Image (cartoon, rainbow, N blue to C red):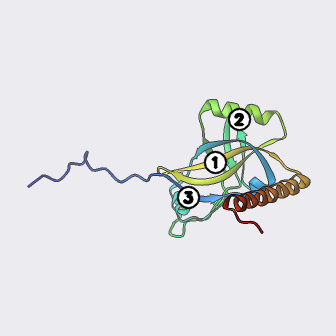
Amino acid sequence: MPEPPGPEEVVAPRETGRQLVASNRRARHDYDILKTYEAGLVLAGTEVKSLRAGRVSLVDAFAQEFDGELMLHGLHIAEYGFGTWTNHQPRRTRKLLLRRVEIDRILARLGEGGLTLVPLSLYFSAGWAKVELALARGRRSYDKRQALAERDANREIARELGRHLKGRRR
């Protein structure tokens, strides 16, 4: 009879792929996205459990520099239902984990002016909580209308092209 595996041989199953928790669809409407970055987050245990339950909101969240580090402000992670006195504050400021070179590049671009750092989505990648940040420039209301009109026109063109390729006409 074979022996059971020793403690060094037991491996817990690891999550694979990208599991989306929340996305900020409004950010793509309000901003022109110039470049995106993936960053880790410094979280408490109850925050991770609340994230896995999907109780998070990216509305009004933004990133800002503080002492050479990037911090995420305004991210709302609801308190964990089964948490005790160790529960977290829902809107606390959270540190973003990026390489120093990336931080310096981002800060140089933000120094140019007119740009902001907004979170686009929050997800788990291989078990780690990640946030997709975008270096973005705010749109004016006429830019938003123009983008909507352009998207509708492209959708109509694609629809007509599909009909033409299938050989059907109106």
Residue that label 3 marks: 47
Q: Quadrant of the N terminus?
A: bottom left
Question: Considering depth in this image, is 41 or 102 the residue closer to the camera?
Answer: 102
Instruction: Tell me the residue at 85%/58% (across/down).
Output: 149
**Badge 1 element:** strand
In depth, the one of 105 and 33 nearer the eye is 33
Distance (Cα) linking label 1 and label 3: 18 Å
For label 2, count other residues whose C-alpha is less than 10 Å away and answer few (under 14), some (14-19) or many (20+). some
- Residue 87 vs residue 61: left or right? left
Question: Badge 2 is on which residue?
Answer: 106
Is residue 36 visible in the rendered image? The answer is yes
Q: Amino acid at mark 3?
A: Glu
Point out which mark residue 132 bears.
Answer: 1
Q: Which comes sooner in the sequence, label 2 or label 3?
A: 3
Q: Residue 60 at x, y = what percent? A: 75, 57
Q: Nearer the viewer, residue 41 or 16?
A: 16
- Residue situated furthest front in the rendering: 167
Q: Is residue 56 above or below residue 102?
A: below
Q: Position of residue 42 (x, y in %)?
A: 57, 47
**Could you give the CA–CA distance between mark 2 and mark 3, rounded to whole angstroms?**
26 Å
- Going 85% across and 55% down the picture, which residue do you hit? 144
Q: Secondary structure at mark 3?
A: helix
Q: Mark 1: few, some, or many residues within 10 Å (few <14, many ≥20)?
A: some
Residue type (three-letter) at the residue carrying disc 2:
Ile
Q: Quadrant of residue 110?
A: top right
Q: In the drawing, does residue 18 fall left or right of residue 144?
A: left
Q: Residue shown at 75%/31% (left/top)?
A: 108
Give residue 4's position: percent from left, percent from top.
Answer: 17, 53
Extreme residue in the left direction:
1
Dot 2 or dot 1, earlier in sequence: 2
